[in-house]
């Protein structure tokens, strides 16, 4: 399912080097590659929000929605009680959300889903006797990269499961230098492919090429890449 990073690099080089326009070093490529990967990944959530606003006609949008869910499932993960205990730093009595977590969508306490509230609502609920949470009706809040959860009497509880979308692993085109040239090294210790769905390969090429054109101060490359990227996105959303 992953996108091969060497395939993307070679396609970008082929497009950028046409008519000897310029060369993209491995360091530059890796920088542009990760920026592009995060840009595509973050766009998934905006697309989900846009699809949710479209009324009716599930049949027409089913394929788009299914594909988007398939793309996101790659990053859908969860941490159990032990992982939370070991990897989520304590901001007593709460937990600091690790850097690998992008967006939390469910918090559980003993297999009971916590209602995730906005900060003001969370503060009001735990201070009001009539709405005060219980272990059977726990609440949670995410603020300033800290996760708070409350149970009986508004007292802190430790979530036993957290479900979230994780940030994609950093992509890396690894290489060895042979005769002063960078040669691809597929060794897993040096190379990490893109984690994105394989359907994103073409868009990755166009995005990276666009940033390369900006770096090389070649408006022709940038404009061509932007045009190709726009056509690709338009085709996907038709």
Image (cartoon, grey):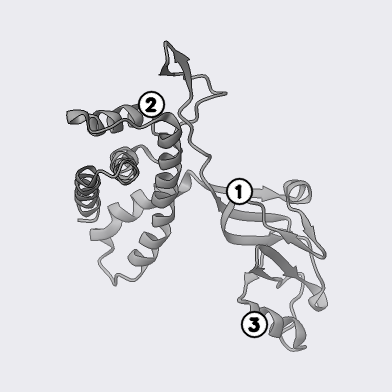
| Residue 1 in view of the camera | no
Q: Label 1: state its secondary structure.
A: loop
Q: Which of marks 3 and 2 is nearer the N terminus?
A: 2
Q: Are marks 3 and 1 in contact (CB under 8 Å)?
A: no
Rounded to the nearest angstrom, the CA distance separating label 3 from label 1 is 26 Å
Q: Quadrant of the C terminus?
A: bottom left
Q: Which of 147 and 203 is in front in this view?
A: 203
Q: Label 3: state its secondary structure.
A: helix
* Label 1 packing within 10 angstroms: few (<14), some (14-19), many (20+): few
* Label 3 packing within 10 angstroms: few (<14), some (14-19), many (20+): few
**Residue occupying the point 71% across, 71% down:** 138
Q: Nearer the viewer, residue 132 or 166?
A: 166
Rounded to the nearest angstrom, the CA distance separating label 1 from label 2 is 25 Å
Residue 222, image x, y percentages: 25, 46
Tell me if 13 is positioned left or right of 186 in this view. left
Q: Label 2: state its secondary structure.
A: helix
**Residue wearing tag 2:** 6
| Residue 168 in view of the camera | yes
* Label 2 packing within 10 angstroms: few (<14), some (14-19), many (20+): some
In this rendering, which labeled residue sits more in front, label 3 or label 2? 2
Tell me if 3 is positioned left or right of 61 in this view. right
**Residue wearing tag 3:** 120
Q: Which of 46 and 156 is in front in this view?
A: 46
Q: Which of 203 and 226 is in front in this view?
A: 226
Residue 235, image x, y percentages: 20, 50
Tell me if 168 is positioned left or right of 143 in this view. left
Among the 4 quarters of the image, the one containing residue 163? bottom right
**Residue wearing tag 1:** 100
Q: Do the residues labelled 3 and 2 touch (CB within 8 Å)?
A: no
């Amino acid at each position: 399912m992953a996108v091969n990073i060497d395939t993307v690099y070679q396609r970008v080089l082929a497009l950028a080097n046409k008519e000897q326009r310029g060369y993209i070093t491995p360091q530059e490529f890796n920088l542009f590659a990760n920026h592009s990967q995060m840009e595509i990944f973050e766009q998934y959530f905006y697309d989900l929000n846009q699809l949710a606003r479209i009324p009716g006609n599930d049949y027409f949008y089913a394929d788009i929605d299914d594909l988007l869910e398939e793309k996101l499932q790659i990053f859908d993960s969860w941490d159990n009680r032990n992982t939370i205990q070991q990897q989520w730093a304590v901001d007593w009595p709460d937990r600091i959300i690790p850097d690998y977590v992008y967006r939390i969508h469910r918090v559980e306490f003993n297999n009971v889903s916590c209602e995730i509230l906005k900060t003001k609502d969370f503060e009001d609920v735990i201070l009001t006797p009539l709405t005060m949470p219980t272990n059977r009706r726990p609440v949670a809040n995410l603020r300033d990269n800290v996760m708070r959860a409350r149970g009986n009497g508004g007292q802190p509880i430790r979530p036993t499961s957290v479900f979230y979308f994780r940030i994609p692993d950093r992509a890396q085109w690894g290489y060895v230098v042979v005769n002063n040239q960078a040669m691809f090294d597929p060794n897993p210790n040096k190379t990490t492919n893109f984690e994105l769905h394989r359907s994103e390969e073409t868009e990755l090429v166009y995005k990276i090429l666009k940033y390369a054109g900006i770096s090389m101060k070649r408006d022709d490359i940038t404009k061509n890449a932007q045009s190709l990227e726009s056509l690709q996105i338009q085709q996907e959303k038709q």
